[in-house]
Image: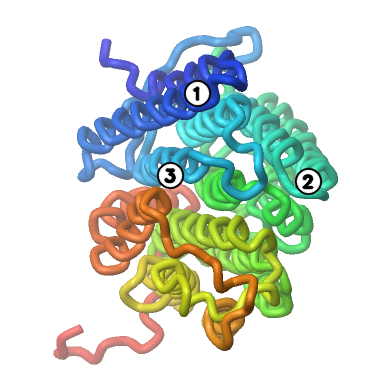
Amino acid sequence: MDFPWLAFIIALPALGSLVVALFPRSLGHVARSTALLFSLATFAMVFAVAWQFDVSAAGDYQFEQQAGWIPQFGVSWAVGVDGIALSMIALTAVLVPVCLLAAWTELGHGRVADPTFLSLILAVEALVIAVFCARDLFLFYVFFEVMLIPMYFLIGRYGGEKARSAALQFLLYSLAGGLIMLVAVITIYFYGPGGETGFLLDGLAGLDVSEGVGRLLFLGLFIAFAIKAPLWPVHTWLPDAAAQAPPTAAVLLVGVLDKVGTFGMLVICLPLFPEASAWAAPVVIALALVSILYGAFLAIAQTDVLRLIAYTSISHFGFIVLGIFAMTSTSQAGAALYQVNHGFSTAAMFLVAGMLATRRGSSVIAHFGGTQKVAPLLAGVFLIAGLSSLALPGLSSFVSEFLVLVGTFQRYQAAAVVATIGIILAAVYVLWLYERMMTGPTREEVKGFKDLRPREAFVIAPVIAIIIALGLYPKPVLDILNPPAERTMEQVGMTDPAPVYPVAEGTEP
């Protein structure tokens, strides 16, 4: 039997979560080191899987493991990774140690050195990785719901003044979507092949149901994923949750956990219900365009830097959903890459914003000014993170955003043109934010700021390095994302449109 890599990758942070939770508060410093060691061990195992991953077969699921779990209901322990799942697991495995290092001292909200806080971070890591690995629909649903619990406590217990209400809103929205999804999952089982493996995604692909039933089941799954993403108009929980959460928890929430929504759309909604996906595509694309513009306009209007970053993410998620439902191989590969790039750029934004908020004791934009004069390195890192968010060429987000727009233009020219307005608005909210916080006269409260500390530099350096590396050379990641995108196109029965302007005969393309 092959070594169960994925089971160990899930179990390792879960075990770490239990171990760290047993530490008393008085041994918080030992708990921090232990949590970091477990996260680094998880990263090492993910790296080993990535090293062994067959890039030439990235469209197929590898490292698969299957065993009966609840045979009476057709539920099995079935895990595996293709290129998309591997990229999301790698994103998670990189960001969790970064978050733990950022929380090495009381960064942001005062209690993040609590062993329980560290335990909850590892629990989120284990559950999110399990979601990305799951190849059984019921197993996916279980982890999809359970991952809400540690995130709820990360926000509600360790967040700001209004954290409890923000956490409750997050939980209620997610549970409502999960309830709708559960109805769809149960119904899918009765229409599926049944038996002891009746929930396997491979067996459910292209489910044989009537047109009306297929569309209803698609909507049941899509609504749950749209809430998680989040997509307008079911996005309203995100700004409060991200602004009230500790910066490290906000990184996990927006950078990793929310990607489960778009991941589900790409690997579950489209393959299981290709006809319904094509039927819903025009409406979903319209919602994605609203998210792009709505999120960008509201980001411009924000007075709090954390809420501004949250609204930018709503805009970015609009681009991801647009790429998925444009249904071209280019747009879907771009959407999959966008998930990864957005995770790193948003992590950088939240982490630096948390460092600034800790120094100032406030995240209100007007409370800053002239920061670059007293903390030039901190301001420089903030600028790079912001430029990545607005998709500056040479930084990671540019490649994915460009692919989404080009792929969308192949099938929906008008939608692609409207979406480009989001790029202009992104330049407005990022550059205006930098101008207000970093330039101009230095406020008295800012003059005492210390520049980037060695530990902070150690935290943010790998994220910035990845942003630059993926901007200059995205090919290794695209090599594992293109085959799954092509496989999805085959599953939904779509082909890329012919060029809008055909190449003249006898000329080079």
In the rendered image, residue 127, in percent from the top left (x then y), is placed at: 55, 29
**Residue 82 figure quarter:** top left
Find residue 98 and name its label: 3
Q: Residue at x 77, y 39 (%)?
A: 171
Callout 3 crowding tier (Cα within 10 Å): few <14, some 14–19, many ≥20: many
- The structure residue drawn at horizontal position 24% and vertical position 91%, both measured from the top left corner, is 504
Q: Which mark is residue 31?
A: 1
The tag earlier along the polypeptide, 1 or 2, is 1
The local secondary structure at tag 3 comes to: helix
Residue 509 numbered tag? none
Please state which of the two labelled residues, at mark 3 or mark 1, is closer to the viewer.
1
Q: Position of residue 378 (x, y in %)?
A: 44, 67
Look at 64% across and 47% down and name the residue there: 246
As shown in the figure, which amino acid type bears the numbered disc 3? Val
Q: Hey, what amino acid is under mark 2?
A: Ala
How far from the left and from the top, in percent, is residue 441? 58, 87
Query: Marks 2 and 3, how far apart in space?
Result: 23 Å
Can the viewer see residue 403 in this picture? no
**In the displayed image of the protein, which residue is found farthest to the right?**
165
Asked whether disc 1 touches disc 2, contact meaning CB atoms under 8 Å apart, the reply is no
Identify residue for label 2: 163
Label 1's element? helix
In percent of width and height, residue 330 lies at 38, 66
Image-based side of 241 in relation to 161, left or right = left
